[in-house]
Image: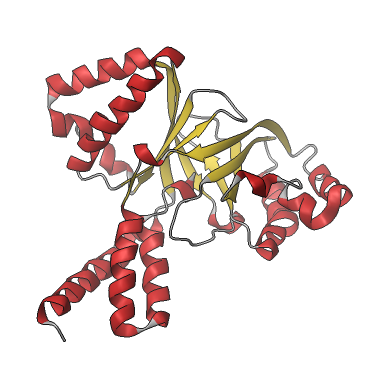
Amino acid sequence: MNHRFALQIHAGVVLLAAALSNPCLAQSSMSRVTITHVRPEMLTEWVDLQKNEVVPALKKAGEKTRTVYVSGLFGSSYEYVIIAPIASFAQFDGDSPILKTLGPVPAARLGEKLRKCTVSSQSFLSTRLDDLSNVIEADQQPKILVSTRLRLVTGKLQEFETFMKTDVLPVYKKAKVGYLVSRRGLGANSNDFVLSTVYSKYADLDGGSVLTKALGPEGAAKVLAKLTGVANLVEQIVRSRVEDLEMFLGSSVLRFFGSSVHRFFGSSVLRFFGSSVHRFFGSSVLRF
C-alpha cells in the first residue's frame, strides 16, 4: 500500500470518527434561519457583498455550512433565506464570526453596506422534527423546496402529530419523496410549522402534490380536510437554491471519503461512511 495514501486514509478516518463521536453534531437538529428582503435596485450589490465579503469572512472564521434559497417564481420577489446549523446556543456567546475575522471597523463598514441593500431581515430558530420527516440522504442539498407554513391552533399539537404520522408521512415514504417538517421557535411564532417537499426540478411539480399523485384529488382532499380546526394555512412558497452564496462542507468531504474508502474497503463501507458524513456535515437545510 502506498505509504502516503495510507496516511491520508488514516487521517480521514480519524476525522470522521471524531465527527461521529461528537454529541453536538449527532444530536443537533436546530438551525438559525434568516429571511432577508433585498431592495430590488440593490440586488446586484447585495449578492456581490455576500459572495465576495460575507462568505469569505465566514469561511476564515471557521464556519462550515450555510445554505441559501431564493423565492420569486412563486413567492415574494427578492426574498433570500439563509440557513445555518446550530450546534448549541453557546456558539452565540462572544463576538460574531465576521467581527472576529474582520475586526470592529471593517465589520461595521460591511454591516452598513449590507443594511443599505435590505428592506428587512428576520432571524429565528428552526428545529427539524425527525419523527415527522422523511429525510432522503443524498450527496447534494435539495435544489427546490415547496414549503407550506401552517399555524397550529392552540392545544392541537398532539392531534397534528398523529395526523402527520398516520395520514401524511406514510405516503411520502412510499413515494420515496423527501419531506421535511420543522417548527419555528425563538424569533418567530412557535405555533408555526413548515412542511417542505423536496424536488430536484420544477417539472416534478406537474401533476399536483405528492398526496394528489398518490391518492387522487378526492383522496387528497379527504386527508387535508382532517386539518380543519387543527391548523390554518399561512403561506405556500417555492424556493430554489443559490449555490454561489453557500458554504457546504458536506459534498467535498463526501467525495474525499467516498473515493478513498471505496478503494480500500468496498461499496458497503462506502455507503456507511457516505451517509454518515452527509448526515453530520451537510444537513443544515434539512433542518429548515
Q: Residue at x 42, y 81 (%)?
A: 268
| Residue 201 higher or lower than 268, as above or below | above
Query: In this view of the protein, which residue sits in the foreground, 9 or 203?
Result: 203
Q: Residue at x 36, y 45 (%)?
A: 86
Left or right: where does residue 108 sit relative to residue 143?
A: left
The residue most toward the right is 218
113 is higher (above) or lower (below) than 15: above
Q: How many marks?
A: 0
Q: Is residue 2 left or right of residue 118?
A: left
Q: Position of residue 251 (x, y in %)?
A: 35, 57
> Which color mode does the image show?
secondary structure
Q: Position of residue 270 (x, y in %)?
A: 38, 76
Q: Can residue 191 be seen in the rendering of this structure? A: no
Query: In which quarter of the view is residue 61 placed?
Result: top left
In the displayed image of the protein, which residue is found farthest to the bottom? 1
Between residue 279 and residue 213, name the one nearer to us: 213
Q: Position of residue 93 (x, y in %)?
A: 24, 36
**Residue visible at 15% across and 34% down in the picture:** 101
Q: Residue drawn at (60%, 40%), measured in percent from left and top?
A: 147
In which quadrant is the N terminus drawn?
Answer: bottom left
Residue farthest along the front direction in this orientation: 203
The picture quadrant where one finds residue 196 is top right
Which quadrant of the figure has residue 90? top left
Image x and y of residue 70, in percent: 49, 33
65 over 176 or under it: above or below: above
Would residue 108 be seen by someone viewing this image from the given angle?
yes
Q: Please state if 265 lies on the left or on the right of 232 as rendered.
A: left
